[in-house]
Image (cartoon, rainbow, N blue to C red):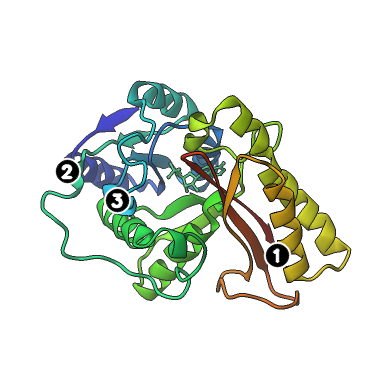
Amino acid sequence: MNIVKTVTELRSWTAEQRAKGNRISFVPTMGYLHEGHMSLVDLAKQHADVVVMSIFVNPLQFGPNEDLERYPRDLERDQVMAEKRGVDLLFVPDVKEMYPQETKTVIQVKGVTDRLCGASRPGHFDGVATVVCKLFNMVQPDSAFFGQKDAQQVAVIQQMVQDLNIPVQVIPCPIVREKDGLAMSSRNVYLKEEERIQALSLSQSLQEARDAYSKGKTPAEIRELIIARISSQPLADIDYVEVLAYPSLEPIEEFGDTSFLIALAVRFGKTRLIDNLMMT
Ligand code: AMP
């Protein structure tokens, strides 16, 4: 596996690959890799000849009181995992390489960012869209892989790619969970023992929501059911629970023929977890 830190090195490697006729898949991450990230690599390998992964903790997508400084990092471990799984090139720029000067250009995707994490983390998706657009321009992949764990992020990137005619196929990938149901996340490492136990209420409440949906409950009833289930955990502090049409992310009063998303964000102490259930 090649490891490069600069855009120049990255571009010369990708140019070589394209000259050989190789198709390039891209997996952008913030590192501290787990099986969720690895599942994206597996799918990326199926879609192309070579896989580029980036690891960059992007300051632009963190708010002033968020966890940028303490975000978990372990590049040595990440390198071993990426290499074992078959990543061909690992791009690990530092902040100066990505933002040599303060960026004056910011990508703002409207509409799909109005609710959920877009509402509770102002500016977050501007940071995400801007860095993903920059990474797409640097790597120029044929396809890029994003986890449905961050369902709103997928909607934002798909909207951006469509609006700006970016020639990258965006491929959403299923959520990977721990054996007990907790959605894998680099941030799970923050959880204290009791928080980790109570965090199971997130995936469990989504399972209950699925059953309630099949019994004909309304979006409002399902939302209330989830709120009641999670609120029964003393350490849980709900940020949002929403039932929305997907990918428009508009509220729905009743279920129809269209896809929908049940999404939630819950704090345990300083740790904010998200999870969701997509029904298509
Ligand atoms: P992150 O490093 O958390 O920014 O995530 C990088 C990519 O991995 C994003 O596309 C995430 O949606 C995806 N991802 C993170 N956790 C999971 C998971 N549990 N299952 C599937 N994809 C995931």
Q: Position of residue 160 (x, y in %)?
A: 39, 68
Q: Is residue 197 visible?
A: yes
Q: Position of residue 88 (x, y in %)?
A: 38, 33
**Could you classify mark 3 by the number of other residues whose Cα lies within 10 Å: few (under 14), some (14-19), or many (20 or more)?**
few
Asked where in the image residue 228 lies, by quadrant, the reply is: bottom right
Quadrant in which the C terminus is drawn: bottom right
Residue nearest the viewer, comparing 279 with 167? 279
State the mark number for residue 64. 3
Residue nearest the viewer, comparing 190 with 99? 190
Residues tagged 1 and 2 counted as in contact (Cβ below 8 A): no
**Could you classify mark 1 by the number of other residues whose Cα lies within 10 Å: few (under 14), some (14-19), or many (20 or more)?**
few
Q: Is residue 140 visible?
A: no
Horizontal side of 239 relative to 89 (left or right) equals right
Which of pointers 2 and 3 indicates the residue nearer the eye?
A: 3
Residue nearest the viewer, comparing 17 with 218? 218
State the mark number for residue 213. none
Mark 1 vs mark 2, CA separation in Å: 40 Å
State the mark number for residue 97. 2
Hey, what amino acid is under mark 2? Answer: Glu
State the mark number for residue 280. 1
Which of pointers 1 and 3 indicates the residue nearer the eye?
A: 3
Hey, what amino acid is under mark 3? Answer: Pro
Q: Position of residue 108 (x, y in %)?
A: 33, 69
SS at mark 2 in the image:
helix
Is 254 situated above or below 96?
below
At horizontal 68% and vertical 49% (from top left) the residue drawn is 231
SS at mark 1 in the image:
loop
**Could you classify mark 2 by the number of other residues whose Cα lies within 10 Å: few (under 14), some (14-19), or many (20 or more)?**
few
Mark 2 vs mark 3, CA separation in Å: 22 Å
